[in-house]
Image: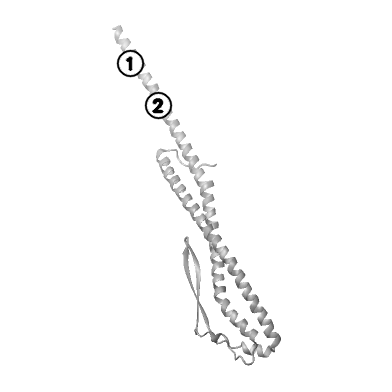
Amino acid sequence: MAMLRVNPTRMELTRLKKRLLVARRGHKLQKDKRDELMKQFLELVRKNKELREKVEKMLMQVHSNFLIARAVMSNEMLEEALMFPKQDVSVDVSTKNIMSVNVPVFDYSTKSDDKANIYPYGFATTSGELDTAVGTLAEVLPYMLELAQMEKSAQLLAQEIEKARRRVNALEHVLIPQLTETIKYITMKLEENERGTIIRLMKVKDMMIEQARKAAAQQAKY
């Protein structure tokens, strides 16, 4: 593992130790965040699967009813019946926060609360299958919005999980080993310098003792 290019000083050693402490703390936080995001993501995927199956089943019923209605009604009558819708639907988009990820929230409202306004035609000239198809479409709308909300949320969570995974890997396999090796290198270098200083001091002490002994012997002669 490559080390960081730094001067082997005590000040640099202290700075790197603080940086290593922050890196380990950040690694733990990112790992916990990744694990919680994964938990939220898997739960969302499970609910998304159940809701998608429900929506697809309802849409298949709508499709079947429309086919039957088209078989018993002329194309002109069918187009005329559905040409001018009576009900208006508006969708409001907001966001909520899941582990620092802003995911969308879809709310819808209709112009009228009267459920009969979903039928833009009279019942005398249309088939019951068309009524059933339009009614089922009105029922499936909130589920489709919820499904869209879940799928977009799952996509955003997956992106955040990937970012967290990369940060965890970078800290765990690159930065923390680099800091650890650099700290180890500086510590060994400082210890080596300290041993060299001690040896030099011992040599200086021996020389001073030898000089003092010679000076004492010289004085003794006189």
Is residue 217 or residue 163 the one in the foreground?
163
Q: Position of residue 117 (x, y in %)?
A: 54, 86
First along the sequence among labels 2 and 1: 2
Is residue 11 depicted above or below 201 in this figure?
A: below
Q: Position of residue 67 (x, y in %)?
A: 69, 82
Residue occupied by mark 1: 212
Is residue 120 or residue 217 the one in the foreground?
120
Residue found at x 38% / y 19%: 206
Q: Look at the numbered disc 2 and give the secondary structure of its residue.
A: helix
Is residue 37 or residue 190 the one in the foreground?
37
Residue occupied by mark 2: 198
Is residue 134 depicted above or below 173 in this figure?
A: below
How many residues crowd mark 2 within 10 Å: few (<14), some (14–19), many (20+)?
A: few
Q: Nearer the viewer, mark 2 or mark 1?
A: 2
Amino acid bearing label 2: Ile
Is residue 149 or residue 203 the one in the foreground?
149
Q: Position of residue 66 (x, y in %)?
A: 66, 82
Amino acid bearing label 1: Ala
Residue found at x 44% / y 43%: 16
The Cα–Cα distance between marks 2 and 1, rounded to whole angstroms, is 21 Å
Q: Residue pushed farthest top?
A: 221
